[in-house]
């Protein structure tokens, strides 16, 4: 009884830890030879943090991330539109974390190896599979070797191989590339001052010109390591170029749009200029699928439902995928029944979230205020009353499975602390 997992990202490693927790053997195959702490900052929402705490990772998360205190929205003039507490300050039983994606991946990898032993094979991509009896056999290929390097057998295959999933491309050969909505993102990390609460996620501007900033660590100088994202919307016929997550960005391409955004709570141009490196990414997602399972394999995480990085839910939803699938494997065994139960529990919900994020999710509040008060405002109540702002925030929480009362009252997906 073995579960085969393609990809040692957040989804695949969370699944591995969850399977270890319930006593189900697994093997993870990762295409790259060396997993390095790549990426930038992400946020983990309370519903996902709860699941990581159930895996016994609370102390480790506190070592590598910050407990988020607040989310705040500002106009392009630096005026506050809306703010609300996050995590336990908002009433959840669990915090929200702002954290470096690479550090989270390294934590999950080290815990998988510590708890389960040498179950991760690096430099081996799953490039094909076929069903054999009551199981599945996968073909392994090495990028360095440029050829097949072996096979492995298990009960089911879970493809967690990211937004450019090779497994998904094999299942849907006519799908083509990722969906681009017209926005390019420039991302960086800057050693800068603490701003607002020192644990605030701040969104400023509007969809076509937006700046997001939040701390992911404290510095020895008393400041913050600020993760930031600058968005610019381009014409739909622009050459947005193929996805390359290591493409160096050019300040001249976006900084001029933010030059006047120096506010008493944060000097945004200074933060941009202070980055050690700037990377350029297209904001892309994938079209929602009508099915994930194909025989004894299924999709998970970005391979199943890549979404725009709005509302801070991509990594969180991948973790929830892993926990739900492990729960169903414990209930049904590692077979088609578990894969179907997992898909029934997750697919429609997360597809709705993909489309909500494509419509700008909770950040739509910025656009509404910009449309109603393009030159700024004296009183936000006259532009967008408190009840309307609150409804925006609460509506997104419901779609994302983050309703405070419902989450606090719900039983854990898998009970029992791992370690």
Image (cartoon, rainbow, N blue to C red):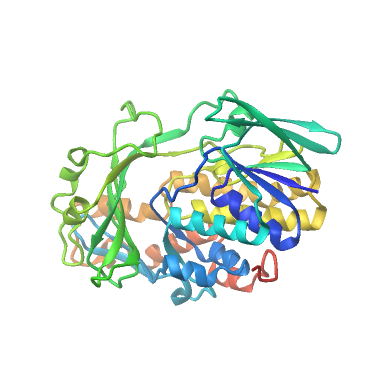
Left or right side of 278 for 1: right
| Residue 240 in the image, given as x and y percentages of width and height | 34, 30
> Considering the image in quadrants, where does the C terminus appear?
bottom right
Note whether residue 183 is visible: yes
Expressed as whole percent of the image width and height from the top left, the position of residue 217 reads 35, 65
Q: Residue 408 at what x, y percent from top left?
A: 59, 73
Residue 69: quadrant of the picture: bottom left
Front position in the image: 161 or 70? 161
Q: Quadrant of residue 416?
A: bottom right
Residue furthest to the right in view is 133
Residue at 18%, 66% (x, y): give it. Answer: 378
Q: Is 236 placed above or below 73 here?
A: above
Task: Decide if residue 367 is on the left or right side of residue 287.
Answer: left
Which residue shows up at 75% across the image and 50% down it? 341
Residue 268 image position (x, y, % from top left): 20, 56
Answer with left or right where residue 252 lies relative to residue 380.
Answer: left
Classify residue 37 as left or right of residue 229. Answer: right
**Which residue does the image show at 60% across and 69% down from the upper left?**
56
Q: Is residue 70 above or below residue 109?
A: below
Task: Return the residue nearer the eye: 202 or 396.
Answer: 202
Say if residue 402 shows up in the picture. Answer: no
**Quadrant hosting residue 30:** top right
């Amino acid at each position: 009884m073995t579960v085969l997992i393609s990809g040692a990202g957040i989804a695949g490693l969370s699944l591995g830890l969850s399977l270890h927790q319930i006593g189900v053997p697994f093997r993870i195959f990762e295409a790259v030879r060396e997993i390095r702490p790549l990426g930038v900052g992400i946020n983990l929402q309370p519903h996902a943090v709860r699941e990581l705490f159930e895996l016994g990772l609370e102390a480790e998360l506190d070592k590598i991330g910050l407990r988020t205190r607040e989310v705040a929205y500002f106009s392009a003039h630096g005026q506050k539109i809306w703010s609300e507490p996050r995590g336990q300050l908002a009433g959840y039983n669990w915090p929200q974390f702002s954290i470096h994606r690479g550090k989270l991946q390294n934590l999950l990898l080290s815990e998988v190896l510590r708890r389960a032993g040498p179950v991760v094979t690096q430099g081996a991509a799953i490039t094909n599979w076929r069903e054999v009896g009551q199981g599945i056999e996968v073909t392994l290929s090495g990028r360095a070797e440029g050829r097949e390097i072996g096979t492995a057998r298990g009960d089911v295959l879970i493809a967690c191989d990211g937004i450019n999933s090779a497994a998904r491309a094999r299942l849907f050969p006519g799908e083509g590339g990722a969906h681009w909505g017209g926005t390019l993102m420039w991302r960086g990390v800057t050693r800068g001052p603490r701003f607002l609460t020192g644990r605030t996620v701040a969104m400023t501007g509007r969809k076509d010109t937006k700046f997001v900033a939040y701390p992911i660590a404290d510095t020895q100088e008393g400041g913050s390591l600020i993760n930031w994202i600058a968005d610019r919307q381009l014409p739909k016929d622009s050459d947005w170029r193929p996805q390359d997550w290591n493409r160096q960005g050019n300040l001249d391409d976006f900084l001029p749009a933010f030059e006047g955004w120096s506010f008493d709570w944060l000097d945004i141009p200074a933060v941009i200029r202070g980055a050690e490196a700037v990377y350029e990414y297209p904001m892309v997602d994938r079209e929602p699928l009508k099915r994930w399972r194909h025989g004894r394999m299924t999709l998970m995480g970005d391979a199943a439902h890549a979404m725009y990085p709005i509302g801070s839910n991509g990594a969180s939803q991948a973790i929830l995928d892993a926990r739900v699938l492990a729960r169903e494997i414990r209930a049904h065994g590692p077979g088609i029944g578990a894969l179907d139960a997992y898909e029934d529990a997750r697919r429609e919900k997360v597809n709705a979230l993909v489309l909500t994020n494509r419509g700008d999710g909770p950040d739509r509040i910025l656009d509404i205020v910009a449309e109603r008060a393009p030159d700024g405002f004296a009183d936000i109540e006259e532009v967008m009353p408190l009840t309307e702002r609150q409804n925006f925030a609460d509506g997104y929480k419901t779609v994302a499975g983050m309703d405070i009362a419902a989450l606090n009252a719900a039983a854990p997906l898998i009970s029992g602390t791992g370690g």
